[in-house]
Amino acid sequence: MHRSCPSSIQTTDIDIEGAPTLQQAVRFALFHVVQAAARAELRAIPAKGLTGGGYNGHTFWDMETYTLPVLTYVAPDAARDALLWRYSTMDLAAARANLLGLQGVTFPWRTIRGQECSGYWPAGTAAFHINADIADAARRYVAATGDTEFEKAEGVELLVETARMWRSLGHHDSTSGFRIDRITGPDEYTALADNNVYTNLMAARNLEHAADLAVRYPQRAGELGVDDEEIASWRDAAAAMVIPPPDGGVTPQCERFTSLRHWDFSETPADHYPLLLHYHNYMLYSSQVVKQADLVLALYLCGDRFDAEQKARDFDYYEAITVRDSSLSASIQSIVAAECGHLQLALSYLGETAFMDLRDLASNTHDGLHLAALAGAWQAVVAGFGGMRDYGETLSFSPRLPQRLTRLSFGLLYRGRRLRVEVCGDEATYSVLDGDPLELIHDGESITVTQESPITRPLAPVPHRPAPRQPPGREPAVELTEFHALPQATHGG
Amino acid sequence: MHRSCPSSIQTTDIDIEGAPTLQQAVRFALFHVVQAAARAELRAIPAKGLTGGGYNGHTFWDMETYTLPVLTYVAPDAARDALLWRYSTMDLAAARANLLGLQGVTFPWRTIRGQECSGYWPAGTAAFHINADIADAARRYVAATGDTEFEKAEGVELLVETARMWRSLGHHDSTSGFRIDRITGPDEYTALADNNVYTNLMAARNLEHAADLAVRYPQRAGELGVDDEEIASWRDAAAAMVIPPPDGGVTPQCERFTSLRHWDFSETPADHYPLLLHYHNYMLYSSQVVKQADLVLALYLCGDRFDAEQKARDFDYYEAITVRDSSLSASIQSIVAAECGHLQLALSYLGETAFMDLRDLASNTHDGLHLAALAGAWQAVVAGFGGMRDYGETLSFSPRLPQRLTRLSFGLLYRGRRLRVEVCGDEATYSVLDGDPLELIHDGESITVTQESPITRPLAPVPHRPAPRQPPGREPAVELTEFHALPQATHGG
């Protein structure tokens, strides 16, 4: 098979001024993400890439939610290959759905070749959100590349069969709300919960997008047995999706989350982290203690469903109870911190995710690199300080620069163009290096960038809010001052 | 150790007229309960007694909730021994509570010598109700025997340490309700639920009784470190216990239970029972399908917390979704059916629990007898048709006789007396065969029975209500007509 070359270094490099070690770490991160994926060629991208024996080579939702958003804009052929691998496991996912009593497909939480390999189902199979994560990765890939060939062949089927799963997983209650009960969201310290906000919002998007695609590709949808009634049932379920309303101003991560026991952080010794090694799952599940971004992930990936003040309140609340016992968390917290105006905190979290392996922050780099954390470094730069969001009709940006950084620029591949975004001082400049004019959104304003004329816009003022607090001892693991020194050599384990 | 002789056959025999095979089965049941327990002598009573290898010799909550209520009135020394065995495992239960991050003691769901031996914690450790079941068995034993020596020595400690567990397991929410979240009630098809009604009501009784005992035995309580503040905190938690309010007239088994998916019984083939062998736990947990009496068990054991109409509505609702994939269920359904006036149904369920092994109804009698089902046969007679309840100040009865039975009598040992209750025609007669006068309650009326003068009272009219429906194919497994024929020899497995 002939393959187009992944993007050149220059096209998608991230350029950071003012923090040389951070610059190095972000390039290290980007290199390893591409290294793990560029020639995977229809094979899965494991959580550790090919760098170590951690997780025994298994692949998780990290691939679609952390790694693919990078590849989509940096090495889209590799993103396509990864999606095609996932697609190649549809038969096994259909069999799994059937075994669970569900329609459509249920992709495995943990797998090598498509079979469910997780042993403890409340933190494996019950985390059904992976199906919406896969559907969303496919949506993002097509939106970013315009690859309608993929969309029509594999994309429709992926969306339709995951939508069928959601339609059968949830049900209408007596008030016609569409509930998804007894499932597990991203936060592995809360399992078998009802109406997890992240899961339900992503499921709603999955259902809506499946309906849109079925309408756009009626023949393909017809081959899959989709009819108007089924499409209508998806749209209805999406519109009726139960989202627990705010309680005391805070969005509960899942129903009644804010009624759970408060975790006593003052009585939690520093050496009792990660908590999962020191506390029984009962105590974790029944308490307001969060392993990793969950509601905060919804604030990022489904940000259109929350207003700015709600996001700020929710971020504060979850920041105080999120312990980051997962390497999947710092990057997401960085992104939402940046959006909420906590730029120094966002920078610290960027440092944590970018230095995860260079400084062996989790003390297990000998098991292999934390690919999701490294991919998260790219996301923290592009979606965090760049403010990029990609769930709308086109890309939108809301750049902002923390005081320590003097300049930030990053390049993206988007619908056949090379786009570069440069943030410097109090301005952002958008350039299309080749290809047709591109409509973008800068801080809510629609702009059209052409090859001839880059567009420069002032940065929007950053809202000033009091810094949120983390649980004692769970502040970001990297000091901002370290960004100016090259990292020490680390001891291999 | 000198031991008093267990009660003689005559004292505690059950005499049934009008159904010779049922008479035989009930005596078979009573014989085996006593056989398993009378000489256990400070050892556990396993779920199978000593009759087979099922459950590998393990002991569960069956012992306290099914077997001990029989022994308490039939062979109280054996009940005491069983409680002393449980008490002998307090150190292991305290260590287990500590491991779980709880105060007091957490008794194991499944054990041989006191260690938790359940492998799947959502249906094991999470079923914390076993602690209240143990506390209630101790309360019942003392109430029935007047054994204040046991109460002062072991009873207080059992109650205090289980109360401490409940106080730390639950917590107050922002409205000062006392919640017990993410635990599992008796129904093993619903796990990690919030505020299970049975669990919370039993926990409240545990807390209240611990407070009462601490006041009654201040020196013993002081030795255990109990002070007035702790006693007050137990009473507060009990009073503030969250009980989900009725939804559409029905008490939810746990919070939001009545919002869960309805199980499609019409699409469930007969050979797919027991469901746990054919459906994933996810589907069971997220659906309104009940393995065994749970809310209905609360209607029985905590009947003072529901009025008659509520019980009738709740029984109807749960009857329609309870599949009895557990041998612990028919007896409880029999008891509550009798209370609600469904006497023929109650008789059928009595048949099912009494014939469980004689007719190998679960097709696994070769693994050993279902001791809880057999003990449940005694309870279905005494608490069902006899209407006996023992959670008040004294025993209360509300006898009723199904049409097929012409006479029913049973004997109890109670506070040093031999009591006999005979139900015949439309009258009940209470006799004290020896000992002091005894105050009882007959259908709400306080009566005092002396050795010289039995008391006869008319039976209260039985409310006439439409018969409830079971899921298709899950009607009681024994036809009433079979009660007149001696059972066929069964095939050993």
Image (tube, coloured by chain):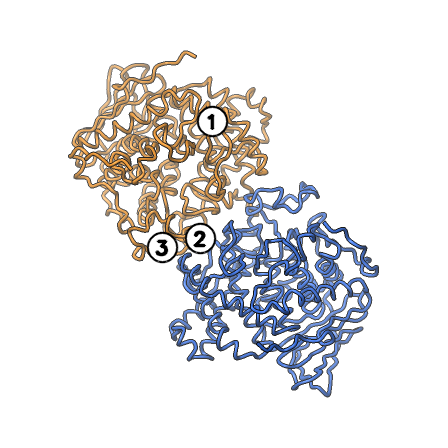
Chain colours: A blue, B orange
Mark with earlier residue (1, 2): 1
Q: Residue at x 60, y 60 (%)?
A: A46
Q: Are marks 1 and 2 on the same chain?
A: yes
Q: Which residue is mark 3?
A: B263
Q: Tell me the mark number nearer the camera, choosing from 2 and 3.
A: 2
Residue bearing mark 1? B86
Task: Give the CA separation, mark 2 to mark 3.
Answer: 13 Å
| Image x and y of residue A226, in percent | 40, 73
Element type at mark 2 = helix
Q: Secondary structure at mark 1?
A: helix
Between B492 and A236, the one nearer to me in the picture = B492
Q: Of callouts 3 and 1, which one flags the residue occurring earlier in the amino acid sequence?
A: 1
**Residue at the image position 74 percent from the left and 66 percent from the top:** A27
Question: Height in image: A419 above or below B97?
Answer: below
| Mark identifier at residue B282 | 2
Dot 2 crowding, Cα within 10 Å, few <14, some 14–19, many 20+: many
Where B97 falls versus A403 (above or below)?
A: above
Left or right, A430 with reference to A183: right
Tell me, yes or no, whether dots 2 and 3 are on the same chain: yes
**Toward which corner of the image does residue B431 lie, by quadrant?**
top left
- Amino acid type for the residue under numbered disc 3: Trp
Q: Position of residue B289 (x, y in %)?
A: 37, 50
Circles 1 and 2, Cβ within 8 Å, touching? The answer is no
- The chain carrying label 2 is B
